[in-house]
Amino acid sequence: MDSPAPVALITGAAHRLGAHTARHLHNRGWNIVIHYRSRQEQAEALASELNNLREHSAIVLQADLSRPDQIAPLADQAIAAWGRLDGLVNSASVFYPNPTEKAQSEDWDTVMSTNLRAPFFLGQACLAALRSSGGAIVNMIDIYSERPLANHPLYCASKAGLASLTQSWAKDLAPEVRVNGVSPGAILWPEGDAEMDQQQQQAILDKTPLATTGKPEDIAGAIAFLLCDAPFITGQILSVDGGRSLNM
C-alpha cells in the first residue's frame, strides 16, 4: 500500500538508540520499518506502541545482517511495505573488546560484517527507492572512529570504515541521495561483555566538557535533523558527545 508519509528503515531498532530514533521519527509523521535480529519481543512491542498512536504506521522485519543473503530481502520487504523508502538509518552495531593478541578471524567476520559490510550492501539494495524519493542515509558512526578505544581495534576499524563510506557515498550518490553520519559520545553505557564499571564511566565523564551523559533523544534528534531538516547537508559526521572529542 502506497503511503503519503515518508518511510524510514532503521536497523537495530528494537532497543537502545535505534528504538529512540524510531519513536522520534514516528512522532514527526514518519512510517517506520523496525528491523531486529533476535529481539523479536521488543520489536513487536515497539511496533504495537507506534501503531496504537497511528494505525498502520510501523512494521517489524527480522534479518541477520551478518548474513549477506538476508540483506536484499530486508530491503525489498521494507520498500514493499508502503511502496516507498525515504530514509535508511544504519543503527545496528556489534561492540565488544577484541585485543589484538586474542582476536580471532571469527571476531573479524562478526564485527566487520555487521558494522561495515551490512550498511554498504543494505544501502546498495535500497538505492533505487531512495533515489526515487530523494531520500537520505544516516550511518551511526562513533567518536572512536577517529580516536580509537584501547583493546577494540576491530570495532574502531569498522566504524572508521563506515565514516569513510559515509563521505564516499555523499559524493557518489549525489545529487539524489544525501548521506551523513552521527557519532555518539557517552549516551548509553555498553551492555553485556562490554560493560564499563563506575570508575571507567567517571573517567569518560571527566573528559567530557558538559560533564554528563547525553540522552538517547539527543542522538534521535540529530538523526531526524539530518533526515528531515538538512536538505543542503551531505557528507558530514555530526559528533553528539558533549564536547568529549575535544579532550580525547
Image (tube, rainbow, N blue to C red):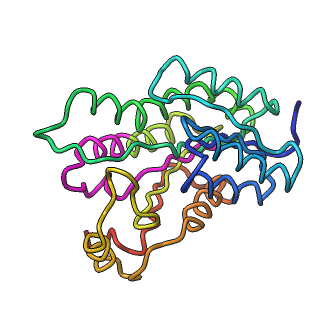
Left or right: where 186 falls relative to 27: left
Quarter of the view holding residue 114: top left
Magenta stretch: residue 145 in it? yes
Left or right: where 94 falls relative to 4: left
Q: How many marks?
A: 0
Task: Name the residue located 78 percent from the left edge and 45 percent from the top edge.
Answer: 31
In this view, the residue in front, 118 or 4, is: 118
- Residue 211: image location, x then y, percent: 38, 82
Q: Is residue 77 above or below residue 210?
A: above
Magenta stretch: residue 28 in it? no
- Residue 88: image location, x then y, percent: 62, 41
- Residue 96: image location, x then y, percent: 31, 47
In this view, the residue in front, 195 or 123, is: 195
Task: Name the residue located 55 percent from the left edge and 65 percent from the top edge.
Answer: 216
Task: Name the residue located 51 percent from the left edge and 28 percent from the top edge.
Answer: 64
Image quarter where the C terminus lies is bottom left
Q: Is residue 65 above or below residue 3?
A: above
Quarter of the view holding residue 35: top right
Q: Which residues are magenta?
A: 136-161
Task: Name the residue located 60 percent from the left edge and 46 percent from the top edge.
Answer: 13
Q: Is residue 143 above or below residue 235?
A: below
Image quarter where the N terminus lies is top right
